[in-house]
Amino acid sequence: MLATLPAAVLWGPAADATNIDPPSMQVDVAVVFAVDFSSSIEPKIADLQREGHAEALTSPEIIRAISQNYLGCIGVAYFEWSSPGRSRTVLPWTRICGLDDAKAAASVISKTGDTGHMRRGRGGTSVSTAIDVGGLLLDEFPGTAMKKVIDISSNGENNDGLPVQPSRENAIAKGYTINAIAIPADDEDPHQPLASYFARSVIGGSQAFVMSPKEPHDYVTALRRKLVTEVSMNIDTHVPPMEAPALSAPTADPR
């Protein structure tokens, strides 16, 4: 079973895991989906994130990328976060080795993930918490993985809890990569896009990048393309171009 994290870190009921077999959870890549469910996440954005992740996991591109790896399996966990102490595990560590596994994991996310209703008391947007909890889940991964990734989805900058920098540096020091998908607001300032904040202050590690869909309906496409890159062990794999291009961390300073 997944090692239990401290109660102060994860709260709320955890969903039943699918295809968990710790003694043999040897995978190519372990990915933690860290999904924003703070007070700013209204129902339409919550649906976008929940269903977007479920759809991306079962897409032909992802299944193909997984099958072309060395072991042909990835490990996936999915949790929701807001302010410090406000995080909830939706999908504990689950091994995905094909479409059936992906469908089972996607079903848990779709049925159990945040709907954006009852947002009172959710708190602010603590990106540092997302990184810290994601790092703890990777620390406790019940097996081995050649690559470990924290995959953040959010519509805002860090405005609650600790500063991002120490959390970011700690995760990078452990060899983890932090990627992100930034969900732009309808009234986003074109001179200060959220994606630029994530590229500058949040992502880091080997080949880290952030993607930002130009419109909400582009979210699933952006997420799918990002996940293909994350789960592939092929060093030639890159994020396909989009109308809104991906932004990468500066190669001279991976932190």
Image: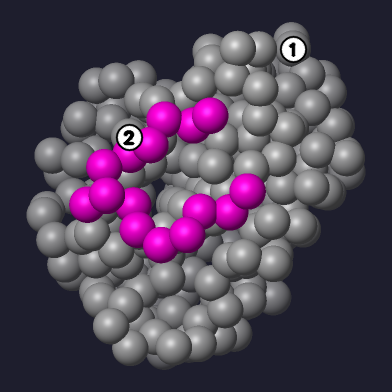
65 w.r.t. 159: above or below: above
User: In the displayed structure, does residue 55 sit left or right of residue 255?
Assistant: right
117 w.r.t. 209: above or below: below
Residue 116 x, y percent position in the rendering: 51, 82
Residue at horizontal 29%, vertical 27%? Answer: 172
Marks 1 and 2, the one that precedes in the sequence: 1
Residue at horizontal 44%, vertical 88%? Answer: 118
User: In the displayed structure, does residue 148 sit left or right of residue 167?
Assistant: right
Question: In this picture, which residue range is highlighted in magenta?
Answer: 1-16
Q: Are marks 1 and 2 in contact (CB under 8 Å)?
A: no
The image quarter containing residue 51 is: bottom right
Residue 246 x, y percent position in the rendering: 53, 50
Query: Where residue 186 is drawn, which disc sits there?
Result: none
Q: SS of the residue at dot 1?
A: loop
Of the pair 67 and 205, the residue shown nearer to us: 67
Tell me which amino acid carries mark 1.
Leu
Q: SS of the residue at dot 2?
A: helix
Q: Is residue 113 one of those drawn in magenta?
A: no
Can you see residue 243?
no
Tell me which amino acid carries mark 2.
Leu
Residue at horizontal 51%, vertical 54%? Answer: 14
Query: Where residue 71 is drawn, which disc sits there?
Result: 1
Q: Quadrant of the C terminus?
A: top left
Q: Is residue 13 one of those drawn in magenta?
A: yes
CA distance separating discs 1 and 2: 24 Å
Residue 190 x, y percent position in the rendering: 39, 77
User: In the displayed structure, does residue 182 sit left or right of residue 230?
Assistant: left
Q: Which residue is mark 2?
A: 136
Of the pair 128 and 16, the residue shown nearer to us: 16
110 w.r.t. 137: above or below: below
In this picture the colour scheme is one colour
Can you see residue 129?
yes
